[in-house]
Image: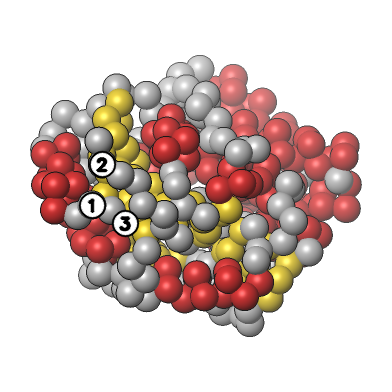
Amino acid sequence: MRERKLCKISIIVPIFNLERYIGRCINSIIKQTLHEWELILVDDGSTDDSISICRKYEENDSRIRLICQENMGVSFARNIGIENAQGKYISFVDGDDWIEPDMYELMWERAGKTGASIIIAGHVDDYGDCVSNKFRSGHSKVFGIGQARVEFFKQNLYGWGPYAKLYTKELLKSCKFNTNLAIAEDMLFNWQILNISQSILYLPIYKYHYYHRENSAMMNAFSQKIDKALVVKYLIYREIKYHLPKYKFLAGCVYTGELAGQIKKMILYNAGNEKCLVKKYQKILRKNFYYAFMYPCTNIITLRQRAGIFFGILPYKICKYLRRCL
């Protein structure tokens, strides 16, 4: 049995059929200028060559461990990684993404100076032939819980995915990923963990490359099942409405933007009992359309979502006609 060495950061990478990308991801971690890390690769029942690729890396670097499980979903995979992590901080990288060489060194240096329970950086959107950054680079700062909640919704400085962040191992003893969710589990996780954190450090570092694949789960056609992303955003909105009302409009913007997106997708893909559900959602949207005008200089609602709100409040027959014309 391999001896587990103490390390500064445990990096957890969930994997499912990523033979084309996992090598790039692992290599970017191996090239980190911070060397005191462990890499926990959790294969979630891959049927391609991902496992054999990971085993070769495991054989050549004692800091790398491979854990294999049946296909149970990304939340199960991340939770297994958390249970096996030995580092002071825990970080997550998706297997089709990659990171620049000095990302963890820069984050670790600031973590040591502040002792923050969460260190939050940002990411860039990588489309292969171009890279874009939708965030506004600010100054390093330690957030109080109130400001952290505001930034969580506005998304001007960082996103709500678990990547490009460090969490103390102690903190993750109290919060895990919801295994009943196949999407938006990362948003719910970060909302829950943010609310139990003692201190949150933001760093204007954008060295995590979130790679957009044409065939990724986020690009697939709309499922006939109700998108769980809408459910998660509604649950957070409802929690805030009754318990943290000062953030009601922020959470309402996020929920309304998602609602408009659901309407567009259901009409486009004729999903399930579309007409009945669309009309139900439209009724809600019409009561909340004013959110399209709120927080115009933030990332809380994209321009596409704002346009979608106006599209979604139109009569159902007009929406269908416009969709056929596109």
Mark with earlier residue (3, 2):
2
Secondary element at image label 1: loop
Residue 51 position within the rendered picture, expressed as x and y whole percent measured from the top left: 16, 37
Separation of marks 1 and 2 at Cα, in angstroms = 8 Å
Residue nearest the observer in this picture, 10 or 285: 10
Kind of residue at disc 2 = Arg
Residue nearest the observer in this picture, 286 or 156: 156
Residue 56 position within the rendered picture, expressed as x and y whole percent measured from the top left: 11, 47
Kind of residue at disc 3 = Asp
Mark with earlier residue (1, 3):
1
Mark with earlier residue (1, 2):
2
Residue 235 position within the rendered picture, expressed as x and y whole percent measured from the top left: 70, 33
Please give the label number shown on residue 62. 1
Residue nearest the observer in this picture, 148 or 112: 112
Please give the label number shown on residue 2. 2
Badges 1 and 2: C-beta atoms under 8 Å apart? yes
Name the mark nearer the viewer: 3 or 2. Answer: 2
Q: Residue at x 64, y 58 (%)?
A: 117
Residue 222 visible at all: no
Residue 275 visible at all: yes
Q: Residue at x 58, y 71 (%)?
A: 112
In the image, taking residue 289 as reference, residue 323 lies left or right, namely left
Query: What residue is shown with label 3?
Result: 97
Q: Is residue 60 above or below residue 242?
A: below
Badges 1 and 3: C-beta atoms under 8 Å apart? no
Kind of residue at disc 1 = Ser
Name the mark nearer the viewer: 1 or 2. Answer: 2
In the image, taking residue 78 as reference, residue 295 lies left or right, namely right
Q: Residue at x 32, y 51 (%)?
A: 39
